[in-house]
Image (spheres, helix red, strand yellow):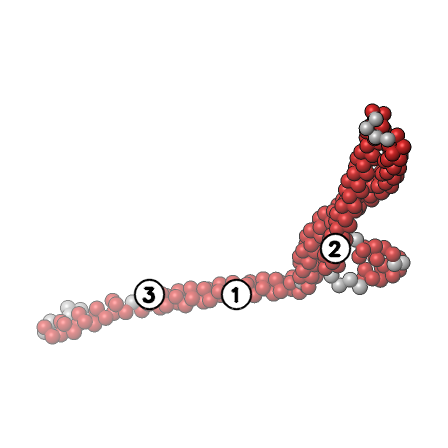
Amino acid sequence: MNFFKRLFKIGEAEANSAIDKMEDPIKMTEQGIRDMKTDLEKSLEALAQVKALAIRAKNETEEFAAKAEDYQQKAMLILKKAQSGDLETTEADRLAKEALIKKEESLKQVTRTKSESDKFDKSVTQLEKNVDEIKKNISKWENELKTLKARVKVSKATKNVNKQMAEIDSSSTVSMLERMKDKVNQEEALAEAYGDIANTAKTIDEEIDKAVDLTETNAEDDLAKLKEQLGMKDKDA
């Protein structure tokens, strides 16, 4: 709590400057929570001490009240003894008077300790409120810290994504895609051209082979040679 009090005490310009210089708001918040927990420990210690004083004052009040009642009863017994002849009247009066004096002294102590007890009770009530307030603030800031950590993660992730998006050159990307399309078109056209060439060469070979018909010519030569070996003459010769 003291940490946040110090922050709020400085001027607006100084506060803004100090906040701007904070390198890590999460660490600053964690330190603030630690400060509040330290304040809580001190408040709990003070509360325990004041409660002890309040209990002691209350016990003393009850003790002095009991003593006052006891002196009252003793004074009455002394007077009764004088009345019954068991004690001289003069002595009885003296002792009864002393008992009543002690009674008054005890009643004064009752008034004093009762006043102290009331003050201590008020202090206890105020300290309990302070403790509850500190506990609420700690809980509040711990929840704020969780939210802050989550926001930091989201902001970092968003920043990284936006940075990556900002570093992408849309015009160069489009140009690259256009070059890739041209390359693909060129490769497709080249493949088609090689196909046409292959088909053309194949057609020419087929035409030549058909025109020459080497198989039939060779067969005729072989037949003539065979007839010659057998002494057979060609009728057309």
Query: On the picture, is 212 further left or further right than 146?
Result: left
Q: Tag 2: Cα neighbours inside 10 Å, few (<14), some, or many (≥20)?
A: some
Of helix, strand and loop, which one carries label 3?
helix
Of helix, strand and loop, which one carries label 1?
helix
Q: Is residue 86 something that shows in the picture?
A: yes
**Which one is in front in this view, the residue at disc 2 or the one at disc 1?**
2
Q: Is residue 58 something that shows in the picture?
A: no
Query: On the picture, is 20 further left or further right than 97?
Result: left
Gap between marks 1 and 3 measured at Cα: 35 Å
Q: What amino acid type is highlighted by mark number 1?
A: Glu
Residue labelled with disc 1: 187
Residue 155 image offset from top left, x and y in percent: 70, 56
**Which one is in front in this view, the residue at disc 2 or the one at disc 3?**
2
Q: Quadrant of residue 19?
A: bottom right
Q: Quadrant of residue 215?
A: bottom left
Residue 106 image offset from top left, x and y in percent: 85, 38
